[in-house]
Amino acid sequence: MDEFLQGWIDWLNAQPFQQTIRYTEWVVPTVQTIHIVAVAVVITAALVIALRGVELTGREWSLARWHQRFRSGTIAALWVLLATGLVMTLAEPERELLNWIFRAKMVMVIVTLIIAHFLSRRLEQAKPDRPAGGDVRAAAFLVLLCWIGIATAGRWIAYAG
Ligand code: HEM
């Protein structure tokens, strides 16, 4: 696997656009900043929804209504995370692609998106003023924990793996 990826890494490192991204001083810090702001958007939405599920916040709105409120913002932030993450990966492909924490993070992102998708569908089908079931509330908490795990992995890439 590493040998296969090394071929791609060498190819990427030989591309002029890669050199521009890697060696233009402001690019990586700017993209990292945008990545972190998008993380804040995703985790804030997941936190409010998880806490609403256990009646700890936002009780004036149903879970389904909170979900509606945050849905498009979260989707936009996830596209931003993908785009900025790709730029960071392009900037230093060997640092990311050969790191097992990065790979684990990508798997966690896919699994979390699948869980979040099913949660989202359940909340879209829910009656806006009916209390959500226990499974929906548990899934909302699980999604929050997953995003926190992904953010933790993202930070650890710099130190381990
Ligand atoms: C969607 C695809 C994503 C890709 C391709 C991606 C990629 C990356 C990359 C390449 C880094 C830099 C790691 C390093 O070299 O130190 C990073 C950092 C990070 N990522 Fe992501 N990421 C994605 C999604 C997410 C999500 C969904 C979250 C959290 C909800 C997240 C949270 C973080 C955090 C907290 C950092 C550390 C930033 C820093 O310390 O400056 N990422 N990500």
Image: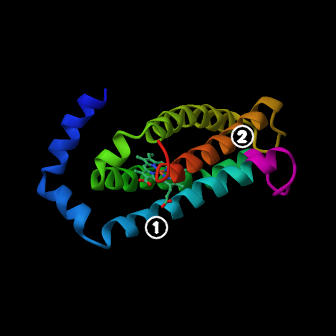
Which residue occupies the foreground of this view, 39 or 74? Answer: 39
User: Is 103 situated left or right of 117 in this image?
Assistant: left
User: Is 70 situated left or right of 88 in this image?
Assistant: right
Q: Amino acid at mark 1?
A: Thr
* Extreme residue in the top direction: 1
Q: Earlier in the sequence, mark 1 or mark 2?
A: 1
Crowd around label 1: few <14 · some 14–19 · many ≥20 (10 Å): few
Which residue is painted at 77% across and 34% down in the image? 138
Crowd around label 2: few <14 · some 14–19 · many ≥20 (10 Å): many
Q: Secondary structure at mark 1?
A: helix
Extent of the magenta region: 50-63
Q: Amino acid at mark 2?
A: Ala
The residue singled out by tag 1 in the image is: 33
**What is the total number of numbered labels drawn onto the structure image?**
2
Residue 21, given in percent of the width and then of the height, sits at 24, 62
Mark 1 or mark 2: which is in front? Answer: 1
Which residue is painted at 31% across and 26% down in the image? 1
> Is residue 52 covered in magenta?
yes
> Is residue 143 covered in magenta?
no
